Image (cartoon, coloured by chain):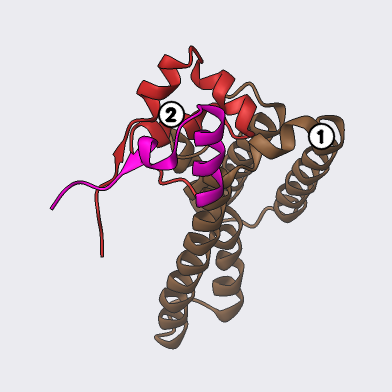
Amino acid sequence: MSTNPIARIRLWGNAVIIAVVVITFGGMMLTQTYWESSPWLVGSVALGYAALSFVSHLRHPDKIEAAWDEQNTAAQRASLVFGYWATLAAFLLLFAAVLTKQIDGGVAFFWLGPVLGIGPSVHYLISVARGRAQ
Amino acid sequence: MTHRLIVRLKIHRQQAGLTQAELAEEVGVSRKTINTVEKGVFIPSTVLALSLAARLNCSVHDLFTLPDK
């Protein structure tokens, strides 16, 4: 694992967001119930990560350049591109499901959330695992 | 137009007596980036290539070349 504190927080932040989304949305799917607190939980974790990331940049200004070097920036950009296409693909699938009356429009919109939320993070973690980012 | 790049960064870095982490620190990138550049996995920008060459006292062409056709 990287010794750069900014990169470490970024890695763990992405991992925790994925874990929370998978647990909450997976749990809802398995139990077929809506957990009222799930959006708040996911939102709180995401905002907490954003705040922690912001503070880490303030505390370690000398580490920013290496944490956001050109390879990490390229990996970040690729993860955003992946997130866009993953969301578009999910939208088309859900749209088809709504048109064929398999699911309600509101439910379809609800399920776009986790794809939009964790798509870039999943791609970024895969980049880290493949040694293409830190 | 796609070419496979021949990378001699590792040789020059070792000749300079630097570790990946030390070279990374000096040119302002992560150690992972130096590692992937050495492996030919990541193609550095012109700016990074020039920075590496300047630190290792050689030309960019010494570090990176295209294979002969």
Picture coordinates of residue A64, whole percent (x, y): 73, 37
- Which label was assigned to residue B35? 2
Left or right side of A78 for A24: right
Say the numbered circle drawn on residue A61: 1
Between residues B21 and A27, which one lies in front from this camera angle?
Answer: B21
Mark 1: amino acid = Pro
Using the image, determine if residue A43 lies above or below residue A131.
below
Q: x%, y% of residue A71?
A: 52, 44
Q: Is A83 placed above or below A94 here?
A: above
In the picture shown, does residue B39 fall above or below A39? above
Percent position (x, y) of residue B7? 32, 36
Closer to us: A122 or A124: A124
Residues in magenta?
B46-69
In the orientation shown, which residue stands out farthest toward the left? B69
Q: In the current view of this chain or complex, which residue is farthest to the top?
A: B17
Q: Which chain is red?
A: B
Is residue B12 found left or right of A76 in the rendered image?
left
Chain in brown, by letter, is: A
Task: Let me know if residue A106 is in the magenta part.
Answer: no
Q: Secondary structure at mark 2?
A: helix
Q: Residue furthest bottom?
A: A99
